[in-house]
Amino acid sequence: MSATPPLQGITVLDFGGTPSAYATRLLHILGADVIMVEPPGGTAIRREPPFVTSQFISAHFAHFCIGRSSICVDLDTVDGRDAIARLMESVDVIVLDQWTNDLMNGNTIEQLARESTAIVARFRDFPSQSQFSEFVGSNLVDEAMSGLLALTGGVGRPPTQLGSSQTWYLMALHGISPIVAALYDRMSGRAEPEVLVVEISAQEAAAMATVQHSNIHQYLWLGVVPKRAGAPVVEGDPGVPRLTLRFVECQDGLVSFGIPIPGDWNVFLGWLDAMGEPVPERFYGVEYFDYSQRTNHQLDIHNFVNGIAKDRLRVDFCESAQAAGLLAMPVNTPGAILADPQLAARNALFRHPLSEVTGSEVLDLSFPFASTPTMHRIVPSLPGVGSDSVRVLQEMAGYTRDEIEVLLACGAIRVESRSIPSMAGER
Amino acid sequence: MRSDPRRVAQHSKHGRGKIMSRLPLHGVTVLDFTWQIAGPIATKTLMELGARVIRVESSAKIDGMRILPPHPPEFQDLNHSGGIHVVNSCKESISINLKMPGAIGALQDLLPAADIVISNFAPGVMERLGFSFDDVRQLNSKVVYITMPAVGSTGPKKHWRALGVNVAAIVGLTYLTGFPDDPPQPAGVVYPDFAANPFHAAVAAIAGLRTVRDQGEGVWIDLGQYESTAVLVGPHVFAEGVSGVASSRMGNRHQWMVPQGVFPTLGMDKWIALSVATDSEWESLVSVLALPDRPEWRSFVGRTRDQDSVEEAVAERTKEFYGHELMDRLQAVRVRAGVVQTLDDVVERDRYLSGSFMHTREKDGIEYRVPGPAFHSEQWEPPVGLLSDMGADTERVLREVGGLDSEKIDRLRASGAIDQ
């Protein structure tokens, strides 16, 4: 059963790049039409490695820009800026991000956006009200300044970033709710459409995870400053490994395993019994049953579970532990989950239009949650550079066919490549 | 009666007497069955956007965050934990013992007024309490009903249990974190609980409001932590699916910014993060650090080919500088640089943030620091405050929202359904 997607009828004009790309992807999946504005030559996300086809199509582009339209505009021309100004009059959301704005006449775009009635989402490295507002950043630099980077890293290693540019994801996640809430307010007739500027910075979004994870009162009241696992304790100390029971090693790879709840020790013993593993006598002692004392025996437990794991495949180990009520999940490579029947059963995957280019089935992740009725939709296409310039300016900005021809002739707008799947036959 | 922070915020003035806009979720009521971390952060976001959030608590099953240390020495009770306030800003609290007569009925009386009902219990708990989606929509046909199980309430693995650390492992986030020659490095934060799950739940709830308004019927959103975390490594999932080759761990490196890394500075365990995106940024870095200006390193291709040596040369120079001094000098010439701050830096140097991120609130003579939202608007003034004492709002909410009269409330009190 499907419902009308919640953002059907909403149009987003997207000047963003990779940092804000997840926010606009989610807006599309919720039903919005996303029009990406590209400079001549195409937006930077198209050149973000890795490339996954012989035509050098970027995985980032193919994943994030699914279902979007594209207009290609030369913002150094008066006619190009006029076209954007006219377009801004008829869109609901304008996404600006500091990184692409630096390349695309950003100040002019923001001034134009502020004259519209749209919701203007402004994504930045650092908050505009902070003393670092003029600083330039990156996912790594923003993570460093947020305190989040300091929390991860092994012995002998510096603070280490989370994989896959998580600071930018955090920024997108913090930005999406206010955008959709403001849209809900307007679509429901509860608020008048007048320009609303919402700013989200990567530094603050990541700092939220820092202060919430660390419980800042640990620091304020007890003076505790959390550090990464491998951090040295004293000068010259090479770092002390803090043992955890996080990973055990099966025949075919690592498993994230845990017995975290005090009452679960009985569950653990029951699991050993069910597996036919002899239970060491010491495991019946109070120092193992008592959660606070058990932490002194982590190495013993870890070695024991590793001994069980080494002769088993991950799938068997995880299934048996989960059936018993323990926590066990494989440490997967990212793509491994595409074969997990759990995601397929929940309609969390869709057939990507690159299937038409590669000639084999390509799957991608769809919606980050299931719903009844189904709330999401994905338009299975990828835009060429400016592939929708003509249609969008005609339909949304009111340009006539003759005017479009003039804009194309002077280079103010361009159509540089075709969309996928329409280019599928070229493989 | 406690003052309503939302009301204050909506009418307060800002800057040069500008009146704030009403928050967009004004008038939305959330019946919040969540506990621990991910659920409360989700409803905190809804509160910051204007919703009224009523936490449903019980002395029979106390939220561990109310017990979690630290507490101020003079208040070792359920209302003064530092952690509970950080993730539950400005929420109301009712405390109902669901095992006592009349308790279920009292909560059912609240359901018709709830726009959103949300829980993050293990699968089956809400059903056993009598608050499944079907139960709830019989009393409120236009409810947005949200569950937040580990891997989903449906599917062959619906019985699987997980904490955030396990979820980060199964989706590949752990695999992608760390250095290429090391094993995968677990994140230092329980990342799914503080990022993927709460914020997806918040946006799902808001989108659900629109769907309900459009369809005229309730919606059940089942937010499996598995799928909501998997999307945060989406390009790597996709790339491996197409090519069959898994992305490699990159430590602190980047594919098109070379060098990028974390380099030592003066002091014990002090570091600076640097990203060099262009050849001109490299020139500026060479100038500030007085690096050897080797011709082969002037190009991106040359630096990439010789990345280890480039990083060694940079590290040799950065360790001669204090981090903040070096950051300021590099930023002055537009090189992406930031010191690796720790929690104390973030708390003590709030001026580095927006100035409206961390807030001080006082309760019983104790000073708390709580974060506001990470989004800002000139037109909005989101409320920031502390959570009500456990059950402090029970009677008022039952009257205002549930329409219960004094006689009924007295009976609930006498039966033990209202926690004392």
Image (cartoon, coloured by chain):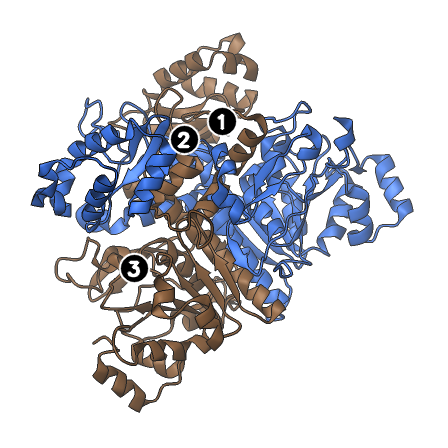
Chain colours: A blue, B brown
In the displayed structure, B101 sits above or below A380; it is: below
- At x 41% / y 64%, what residue is drawn? B383
In the displayed structure, B135 sits above or below B372; it is: below
Kindly indicate the quadrant of the structure image that contains residue A297: top left
In the displayed structure, B226 sits above or below A338; it is: below
Image coordinates of residue B402 in percent, x first then y, are 39, 81
- At x 51% / y 15%, what residue is drawn? B303
Q: Which residue is mark 1?
A: B246
Are the residues at dot 1 and dot 2 in contact (C-beta closer than 8 Å)?
Answer: yes
Q: Secondary structure at mark 2?
A: helix
Graded by Cα atoms within 10 Å as few (under 14), some (14 to 19) or many (20 or more), the crowding at tag 3 reads many
Q: CA distance from mark 3 to mark 1?
A: 41 Å
Are the residues at dot 3 and dot 1 in contact (C-beta closer than 8 Å)?
Answer: no
Q: Give the quadrant of the N terminus of chain B.
A: bottom left
Q: From the viewer's side, name the closer residue of B201 and A401.
A: B201
Q: Which residue is mark 2?
A: B175
* Chain ID of residue with mark 2: B
Q: Which residue is mark 3?
A: B85
Q: Secondary structure at mark 3?
A: helix
Q: Give the quadrant of the C terminus of chain B.
A: bottom left
- The numbered mark, 3 or 2, whose residue comes first in the sequence reads 3
Amino acid type, label 3: His
Amino acid type, label 1: Ala
Is the residue at mark 3 from the same chain as the one at mark 2? yes
Is residue B159 visible in the rendered image? The answer is yes
* Chain ID of residue with mark 3: B
- At x 44% / y 41%, what residue is drawn? A132
Image coordinates of residue A266 in percent, x first then y, are 19, 48
Amino acid type, label 2: Tyr
Image coordinates of residue B182 in percent, x first then y, are 35, 22
